[in-house]
Image (cartoon, grey):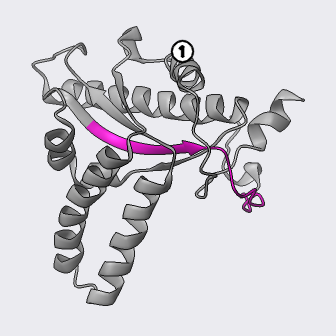
Amino acid sequence: MDFHHFLRTRRSIRRFKADPVPDSVIETILATATYAPSAHNRQPWRFVVMTDSSLKENLASAMAIDFERDLTRDGLPPEKIQAQIKRSKERITSAPVAILLCLDMSEMEVYPDGKCQQAERTMAVQSVAAAGLQLLLAAHAEGLGGVWVCSPLFTQETIQRTLNLPESWEPQALFFVGYPAETPEARERKPFTETIIFS
């Protein structure tokens, strides 16, 4: 397959077959994800792999409490709140594999200047995001589907507590991975010429 065609055929998959993903395949995907570039080569990404249904159920229920509180504060009608919570729970529990991607700042540089320190954190976040994309492409290479959601940003402490994570592991994103039960059409993209300045 032409490599550019391969890259362009990755899709965000939200429905999966019930087939389990072999541990060896998960390990291959994660190993490839760690070949992403990172600031100072500090590799600040951390991964939590969840395949146990009870663990995913516990996580989904814990996160739902925070979501309900936040959505209530936002003034959403109760029926819309419950619909969103139901969808969130189903995403976590129905995927054969849920992978939590975390940021660990403990090995990044520390600067006395606030502006430099903020830039260092941004570089670390960008590094973690690069690993996330690499993870999705590695899953695609294995014939798997995957999707990225940023919901952990809104419930970091709850996730840390529920999964008993090290204090320095800051939840950033969840990736749901499995054999796809759908092949959605590509969504429309802006013409690349509208997003680029050649100078």
Position of residue 16 measured from the top left corner of the image (x, y, whole percent) = 61, 53
Quarter occupied by residue 72: bottom left
Position of residue 42 measured from the top left corner of the image (x, y, whole percent) = 35, 12
Does 70 lie within the magenta span?
Answer: no
Residue, disc 1? 35
Residue furthest top as drawn: 41
Q: Is residue 124 above or below residue 8?
A: above
Kind of residue at badge 1: Tyr
Pick whichever, 89 or 115, lies toward us.
89
Tell how many labels. Answer: 1
Question: Which residue is rendered at x = 33% and y = 20% of the image?
Answer: 44
Is the N terminus in the top left, top right, bottom left or bottom right quadrant?
A: top right
Is the C terminus in the top left, top right, bottom left or bottom right quadrant?
A: top right
Secondary element type, mark 1: loop
Please give left or right for residue 66 compared with residue 43 in the image: left
The secondary structure that most of the magenta stretch takes on is loop
Question: Which residue is rendered at x = 42% and y = 26% of the image?
Answer: 127
Question: Which residue is rendered at x = 60% and y = 24% of the image?
Answer: 25
Residue furthest right as drawn: 1
Question: Which residue is rendered at x = 83% and y = 28% of the image?
Answer: 3
Quarter occupied by residue 173: top left
Position of residue 77 measured from the top left corner of the image (x, y, whole percent) = 28, 90
Please give left or right for residue 142 compared with residue 135 in the image: right
The magenta-colored residue range is: 171-190
Crowd rating for badge 1 (residues with CA inside 10 Å; few <14, some 14–19, many 20+): few
